[in-house]
Image: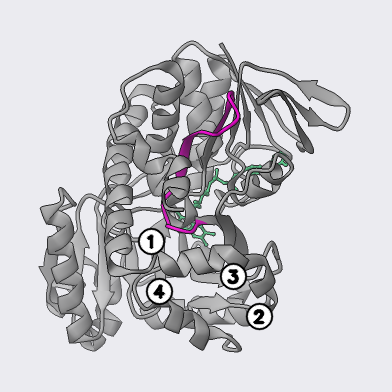
Amino acid sequence: MKALIIGSGLIGITSAYFLSRCGWEVTVLDRQEGPGLETSFANGSLLTPSMPEPWNAPGSWRVLLASIGRADSPLKLRLGALPHLGRWGIEFLRNSSPENYERNTLKNLNLALHSLAVLRSLRQETGIQYGCASHGSLRVIRDPAALERALAWGDRLRAANGPAFRRLTPDEIVAMEPALAPIGGQLAGGIHYPADEIGNAYEFCVGLADQARRSGVDFRFRTPVSTIEVRQGNVTAVLSGETRFTADRYIVAAGSYSPLLLKQLGLNLPIRPAKGYSLTFENPRLERQFKLPINDDDFHAVVVPLEGAIRVAGTAEFAGYDLSLPESRIRNLMNLVRQVLPRAGLTRAQAKPWCGLRPMTVDGVPIIGPTPLGNLWLNTGHGHLGWTLAAGSGQLLSDLLTGGSPRVNSGEYALARFNRAG
Ligand SMILES: Cc1cc2nc3c(=O)[nH]c(=O)nc-3n(C[C@H](O)[C@H](O)[C@H](O)COP(=O)(O)OP(=O)(O)OC[C@H]3O[C@@H](n4cnc5c(N)ncnc54)[C@H](O)[C@@H]3O)c2cc1C
């Protein structure tokens, strides 16, 4: 069987790899020069089954409304983006009821746990190197009541097969991660999640694409897809300029651009871009070794040690498809990383700023599976969890297409769930 995948980010590449391993003939089209150059490029690098929650937590509408006009808000709504959000915005808020939030969290949790298991075997099988470290992650919290809430929620997830965690006092935090010594006195406590991992998503994309290429996957870069041609309920070709690409099955894994591609077919995907930023500091000077990724609850950001670098990532902005890098947002992340690692001496001149568009669904759960068009499939909408969910999503899509046995309940990720919800 022949598959054609649009998109060579984390999701398109993992899909290609697993399909080709099942003996399928796979072609991947991407408008960029190489793999992983859009949202998968400089993300937060964390793989966190410990944090499978969608972003529309109960009460998130208050945070969004309060963000209008504030440059430093972690979750930000720009007024200009409101017309593009429309019905998506209403559904996003509808999904923030406590019942929906918990149900959607558990769907992500199941896929995240599966995904990390798949990733471990993939590492063994391929030997790819992407700066993976498996010491877990550290969540630091300043407010005692917030710490108790986080622990209670962790217990609830654990009761649903969620990952183990350990409560830490400020002293234990500093003993575990000495780079946090300067801020130990500000903390109410923290939580260590041993199952979490870190890894450079871009290096993973390059490494896995290379493996996939060697096993026969045909990557066509600098190939922007403009049209998906449909006849009698089936896709007949995908067009890039004058070139027509044909296959038996077509898979859209185009991240935040997936809804734009499908609009021409009358399919309205409930995905909108949520912009996020990162700063990467190469060769930082730290007096103490920094080895654990820090998730700072109060700043809604992560500070992560990469090989020879520190990366800070965070903030979500509903600002349409804008990819500008305003100095105010960079300053915001600079302030934040300085508050977490005040002695690292990190400067603006050292920082490499980046932004990406997280493909956010209304319920915060990805869309994996068939569409109403017979041979058109989706693997998209992974939002802020695309790295965590990538390996499991690629394998799930491949299982569904090749008749394998999915190890998660595939109906939970199907596009059809939105019809059922009305
Ligand atoms: C600041 C930030 C921090 C993040 N941190 C984390 C984290 O710590 N952990 C985590 O799990 N996730 C994180 N994420 C989320 C994660 O990075 C994304 O969910 C993931 O990268 C999405 O992958 P993708 O393959 O769907 O999309 P992309 O990587 O964007 O890939 C889509 C591909 O489709 C191609 N494409 C689009 N349209 C067309 C077209 N018309 N023709 C041809 N090609 C096309 C693009 O060129 C692109 O290569 C973060 C995201 C951001 C922005």
Depth check: 63 or 301 in front?
Answer: 63
Instruction: Name which residue type carries label 2.
Output: Leu
Q: Mark 4 against mark 2, which lies toward the viewer?
A: 2
Instruction: Name which residue type carries label 1.
Output: Pro
Identify the disc placed on residue 318: 3
**Above or below for 134 versus 223:** below
Residue 370 falls inside the magenta stretch? yes
Report the side of 225 relative to 43 (left or right): right
Categorize mark 1 by other alpha carbons within 10 Å: few (<14), some (14-19), many (20+).
Answer: many
Check disc 4 and report its element: helix, strand or loop.
loop
Question: How far apart are labels 3 and 4 at the CA level?
Answer: 16 Å
Q: Earlier in the sequence, mark 1 or mark 3?
A: 1
Q: Which residues are magenta?
A: 361-377
Q: Is residue 277 visible?
A: no
Identify the disc placed on residue 139: none
Question: How far apart are labels 4 and 2 at the CA level?
Answer: 22 Å
Check disc 2 and report its element: helix, strand or loop.
helix
Q: Which residue is disc 4 drawn over?
A: 300
Q: Which residue is disc 1 drawn over?
A: 54
Image quarter (top left, top right, bottom left or bottom right) of the N terminus: top right
The residue located at (41%, 76%) in the rendering is: 60
- For label 3, being within 8 Å of ligand 1 is answered no
Report the side of 88 relative to 306 (left or right): right
Report the side of 364 relative to 167 (left or right): right
Q: How is the image coloured?
A: one colour
Instruction: Name which residue type carries label 4.
Output: His
Q: Which residue is disc 2 drawn over?
A: 79
